[in-house]
Amino acid sequence: MASPQPDLASTLEEIREVRRIGLVRLRGRPLPHLESAAAVAVTGARTPGAAVESLLRRAVSLLDEGTLRTAAEYTLGFAQGTRDWPASSRRARAASVYGVSVERFRKDHEVMVLGQVAEHVVRLAAAPAEQEAGEGAPPGGERERGGVAHRTVRVLVGDRQVALTVHMHPVDLLRDVDVVVSPINVHLALPEAYKSSVAASLRRAATVWGVTGDVIEDPVHDGLREWAAEHGTSGRAVLPGTVVATGSGALTAQGVRRIYHAAIAVPRAGTNDYDVLPTHVTAAVSRTFAVLAEESGRTAPPLRSVCFPLLGSGRGGLPYHVSLGAVWAAVEAESARGADWDIHFVVRTPEAAALVARIASGIRP
């Protein structure tokens, strides 16, 4: 019997069922429309349940950054630490993202959020047919596998090749990378965990949560406060380009051992905006390597890998190519002197991934 073709209404109904039962009870549940979509859009999954989860994770990652994507992550249990939460706790946390009551969220916002996820699922199921017609193919002719794209770029620096790993997915999905670099403002003030920035995502992923959504440990926040007290900077700004190392909390379970906070954003007086200079990005990346060298010799096993987002390309306002150029200037200088770190980049869009892949031929808009 042929699998049913996914339609929006049936797909939405099955996504509501996933919300209700949760990811930990997904295996073995009959979800024919989602399974049909996953069979087309996802490769490499061993079971239908794993394929459906990967498909939904990919659909959520395509939502606009901000409250919409964050609420979807909490609603479906993709936010770090919420996988085994009961549906009521996930709904309550998602309602807090919009600042509304649980009942209002259930009747209004949740319908909109899950509807947006369903639309992306249907589009993903149709995407391979479009690609066969030559439309919408990913940069470089590569397809994402299981909703997470990785590629290796080899760049000649001096007389040797340097391999760069490019990840195209949310930063909190990183696995087995020793150090992740997170942008922060010069006051070392973290965004709230429910927001959608790199810093907020890493804070959320590192936090230890209780089953009802209570914060048990907030190690990134605590680590930054301890560093500021130790260095006498509490209540005042640090110099742009400063890098502060903290533990990674719950992210250690994913193989992420340290978070390096790069102070590059300078608040603009009288506004909610920030200024980020490319020179400060380059200085922060250079300092990252210095801190990495200092810490590596004190850890067992030594720290070897480090992952950079495109620093300053969010609220800092730097175009992708400007941010990448500033980051790459320091990476190239470090590699040219013979350093042998395992370098990674994490981005969210095909445009940014393609730009990193073009480093070998020169960065350009």
Image: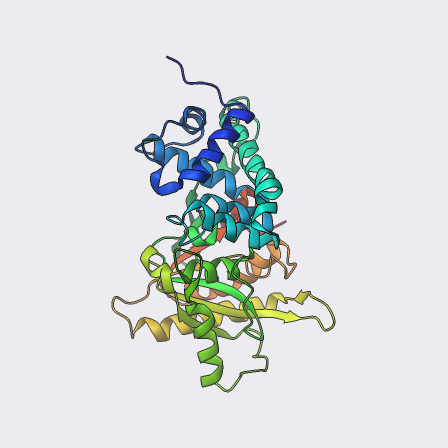
Depth check: give the residue in front, 138 or 253: 253
Residue 102 in the image, given as x and y percentages of width and height: 56, 49
Residue 54 in the image, given as x and y percentages of width and height: 41, 38
Q: Which residue is drawn at 47% across and 71% down?
A: 221
- How many discs appear? 0
Residue 131 in the image, given as x and y percentages of width and height: 52, 26
In the image, 114: left or right of 252? right
Q: Residue at x 49, y 35 (%)?
A: 16
Q: Quadrant of the N terminus?
A: top left
Placement of 172 over or under 246, stated as above or below: above
Q: Residue furthest right?
A: 270
Q: Is residue 129 visible?
A: yes
Which color scheme did the rendering employ for the protein?
Answer: rainbow
Q: Residue furthest top?
A: 1
Quarter of the image for residue 350 reads top right
Q: Residue at x 33, y 61 (%)?
A: 252
Quarter of the image for residue 23 reads top left
Placement of 314 over or under 288, stated as above or below: above
Residue 39 in the image, given as x and y percentages of width and height: 40, 26
Depth check: give the residue in front, 120 or 267: 120
Q: Which residue lies furthest to the front in this view?
A: 103
Placement of 276 over or under 194, stated as above or below: below
Depth check: give the residue in front, 148 or 51: 51
Q: Residue furthest left?
A: 300
Q: Is residue 341 visible?
A: no
In the image, 298: left or right of 292? left
Placement of 357 over or under 179, stated as above or below: above
